[in-house]
Amino acid sequence: MNTRSITIAAFTALLTAVTLGGSIWGFIFLGGPNSVTRLDVIRSDNIIVNLIPMLTVFLCAGGLWGLGIARLMNADAKSVVKACALSWTTTVFAFVTVIFILAGFFGGLSRINFLPIFPHSRHYNFLLVFVPIIGIASAINGYGVANKLGFHERKKSVGLYTGLAASLGFLAVGLILFFSFGWEVGYHIIGRSGMLKILLFCSISGALAGGMAMGWMLEKSRIRMDS
């Protein structure tokens, strides 16, 4: 990889991680009260009232993400911003819907248990649920971005590598937090760990890995088209 390719990959990774982290923080902030802000921003029990501002957060985050990618790849900003805003929001809400369906089926998120006899099963169940969903969501976004940028022959490869990298990044940090620091879903230490905090760290690492893979694949595709 040349210097430009490394720069594109690094900036895409950082842009994706910041976008995801900002989206999660915005979601938590608006959905308060919580341990981060202690503020009850939206004072309503109406699901529509809660949904509209949260939808706006993800649309804006996805749009900014698309704008950054368009600038990096010298592409038409307007079309990429629209595509990324819709793709980002759709995949996030599909992700949330799947989690709520699973939680409702099992009687609560903490009761999702695919490994009932396995030691530390809650943490492994957390990884079993989130790793594939993160991978699929990342793959869809990578596919959509590549398609909108005009890399039609490479869009499947971009989506595949983006999804695999995001899944492995999420999984790696989830295991590192558990085996190296003792952070475990279901047995948190006050002020140090808990599912939301572990999810945030794992998601950001997944976004970094997925963004790096996507940036590398996009730049590689651009070089092939130019040659």
Image (cartoon, helix red, strand yellow):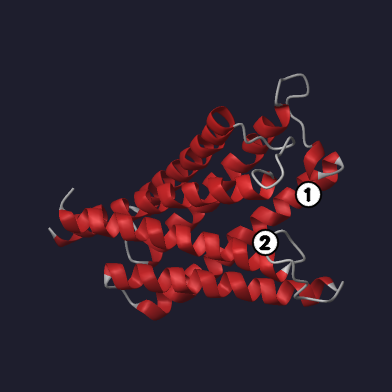
| Dot placed on the residue nearer the N-terminal end, 1 or 2 | 2
Q: Is mark 1 on a helix, strand or loop?
A: helix
Q: What residue type is labelled 1?
A: Ile
Please give the name of the residue rendered at 84% of the width and 39% of the height, measured from the top-left corner: 106
Examine the image and state in which quarter residue 177 appears: top right
**Crowd rating for badge 1 (residues with CA inside 10 Å; few <14, some 14–19, many 20+):** few
Q: Which residue does the numbered mark 2 point to in the structure image?
A: 36
Query: Does residue 124 appear left or right of residue 158 in this picture?
Result: right
Please give the name of the residue rendered at 18% of the width and 48% of the height, measured from the top-left corner: 1
Residue at the left extreme of this rendering: 227
Q: Which residue does the numbered mark 1 point to in the structure image?
A: 101
Examine the image and state in which quarter residue 116 appears: top right
- Please state the horizontal and vertical placement of residue 6, each as a whole percent of the image: 24, 53
Q: How many labels does the image show?
A: 2
- Please state the horizontal and vertical placement of residue 61, each as a whole percent of the image: 52, 70
Q: What residue type is labelled 2?
A: Val
